[in-house]
Image (cartoon, rainbow, N blue to C red):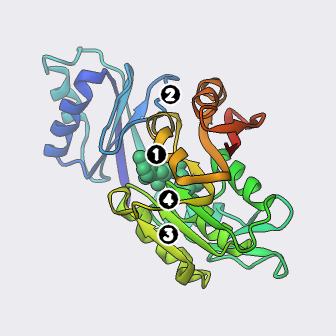
Amino acid sequence: MAWIQLRIHTGKQEAELLSDLLMELGSVSITFEDGQDEPIFEPKLGETPLWTDTVVIALFDANMDLQPIVEMLKNLPYMSQDFAYKIEQIEDKDWVREWMDAFHPIKFGQRLWICPSWREIPDPQAVNVILDPGLAFGTGTHPTTALCLEWLDGLDLAGKEVVDFGCGSGILAVAALKLGADKVTGIDIDYQAIDASKANAERNDVADRLSLYLPQDQPADLKTEILVANILAGPLRELAPLIADLVQPGGKLALSGLLREQAEEISECYAQWFVMDEPAHKEDWTRLTGVRK
Ligand SMILES: C[S@@+](CC[C@H](N)C(=O)[O-])C[C@H]1O[C@@H](n2cnc3c(N)ncnc32)[C@H](O)[C@@H]1O
């Protein structure tokens, strides 16, 4: 099916109103995009924060005549007569296929490969995690995940217990199990992450050693030798006492999802409970590690 899209630059306040109106006028989907370079790093679950210059992109069936819609929008009290817009034809593509074609096996550290489930395994002798992230975060292509995978690859996990806090696709949990961990507990606030982690554990024949919980259901007496949490600075700060409490004395911790400029503050916060190491960096992102006092 062919599509046509209308891109309109507007403000934070007007974007939602415009979105509702365009849906009523027959748009099949609306996307909001940053009109300038104004990154938003930590929206809470269910929140849709917008930008000062927000681009509202409305997708329509290609047969739709968009010019009358543009004329109508010019008369709205919250739009200016000369608002910036663009009408674009969209090439018909299989977007899922496109994404799948772009995702290849990647090696992390010395032993570990993350292999998309639809690709051939490049090194059958390596530690291979067969992954389909589904709707959850975690393919290994993001620096925050890569930093955690490299850390796990560098540990001796044989017979160890691990907690993956914010497990997403289960990529870290499954990697830890395939690297030799005895048992892993994955925790996430998003039930889609729990589902994806379960499916990936089954795909890798390690489901019997992975326990998955929403935070409210996690065992009250949970303690671990190794904890990895890739969940952004805000939750890492808020959850610091809880995360510290999960790690046994002498246990190892890795925190990821931090921007370089956030690392010092988070490191100081966790230094109450952990002897913290020098941070590791990848692009704009930082991983903190430490040992529980
Ligand atoms: C950046 S993703 C990391 C996924 C995967 N572990 C990885 O490294 O690619 C962060 C995950 O943490 C989850 N999360 C965010 N806040 C959380 C919280 N307070 N408790 C548990 N999980 C949380 C999100 O739902 C998301 O799946």
Whole-number angstrom distance, CA of label 1 to CA of label 2: 29 Å
Q: Are marks 4 and 3 in contact (CB under 8 Å)?
A: yes
The reply, left or right, for residue 214 in relation to residue 126 is left
The reply, left or right, for residue 82 in relation to residue 131 is left
- Specify whether residue 181 is in view: yes
56 in relation to 208, above or below: above
- Residue type for callout 3: Ser
Disc 3 crowd rating (10 Å Cα; few below 14, some 14-19, many 20+) is: many
Task: Tell me: is circle 4 under 8 Å from ligand 1.
Answer: yes
Q: Are marks 4 and 2 in contact (CB under 8 Å)?
A: no
Q: Residue at x 25, y 39 (%)?
A: 66
* Residue 213, quarter of the rendered image: bottom left
Name the residue that disc number 2 marks. 39
Q: Quadrant of the C terminus?
A: top right
Name the residue that disc number 1 marks. 242
Name the residue that disc number 4 marks. 168
- Report helix, strand or loop for mark 4: loop
- Residue type for callout 1: Leu
- Report helix, strand or loop for mark 1: helix
Residue 240 point in image, percent of width and height:
50, 39
Mark positioned earlier in the residue sequence (1 or 3): 3
Name the residue that disc number 3 marks. 197
Q: Nearer the viewer, mark 1 or mark 4?
A: 1
Whole-number angstrom distance, CA of label 2 to CA of label 3: 28 Å
